[in-house]
Amino acid sequence: METFPSKNIPITWVEKGTLARNLFLSFGFAIITALSAQIRIELPITPVPITAQTFVVILAGLLLGSTFGSLSMLMYLFTGLAGLPFFSGSVAGLAILKSPTIGYIIGFFLAAQIVGRLSHTPLLAIVMGTGMIYLSGVFGLTLILNISVIEAFTIGVVPFLIGDLIKGFGAVLIAYKIK
């Protein structure tokens, strides 16, 4: 069982729950991710908005663990692909596949998996999970916008570094309080 360092407090809720409960929590986090996508701040230097999604992704990984945290992000992606207005801005359905943010959304699944696996070391979980979101996001930006990796890093990572670290630490504090 994963625990917070020196507290012996379990990090994930799912270890004690039934499959139905864990699936319900996963879908709940998919909905919270969709709601957090609507908190949107546009920046003139990038096509990627600031949202609260990275906070929710890290929180999902910490509370639900790697399996159900990443499942919640798959539920978010596929529910949005099905046409529900889950994505940030006016993008809905399959149009997200041509959006500059698709790489980040795919990265949410991978990040929740990483955060869940590393939840016993929250600082490493934040850094690695956020790093995976950035890596996927930069890859998506290079493909969709046909720009270099350096340009994609400049517009897709640099403007978000400080805010995402703050969101990551906030997610750890909330996960700790919930426990």
Image (cartoon, rainbow, N blue to C red):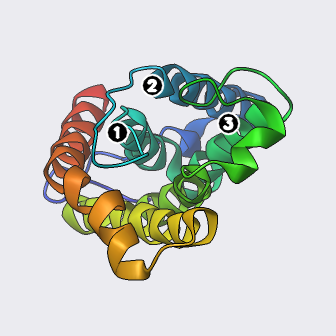
Residue 76 - label: 3
Q: Nearer the viewer, residue 158 or 165?
A: 158
The x and y percentages for residue 124 are 25, 69
- Which residue is nearer to you in this view: 120 or 87? 87
SS label for mark 2: helix
Task: State the residue position of label 2.
Answer: 36
Labels 1 & 2 near each other (Cβ < 8 A): yes
Please tell me whether mark 1 sits on a helix, a strand or a loop: helix
**Residue type at the position of mark 3:** Tyr
Which x, y percent locates residue 29?
56, 30
Which quadrant is home to the C terminus? top left
Task: Give the residue type at disc 2.
Answer: Ser
Residue at the (38%, 25%) spot, across then down? 40
Question: Within 10 Å of the Cα at label 3, are there few (<14), some (14-19), or many (20+) other Cα atoms?
Answer: many
Could you tell me which secondary element the residue under label 3 belongs to?
Answer: helix
Q: Which residue is mark 1?
A: 55
**What is the quadrant of residue 22 in the picture?**
top right
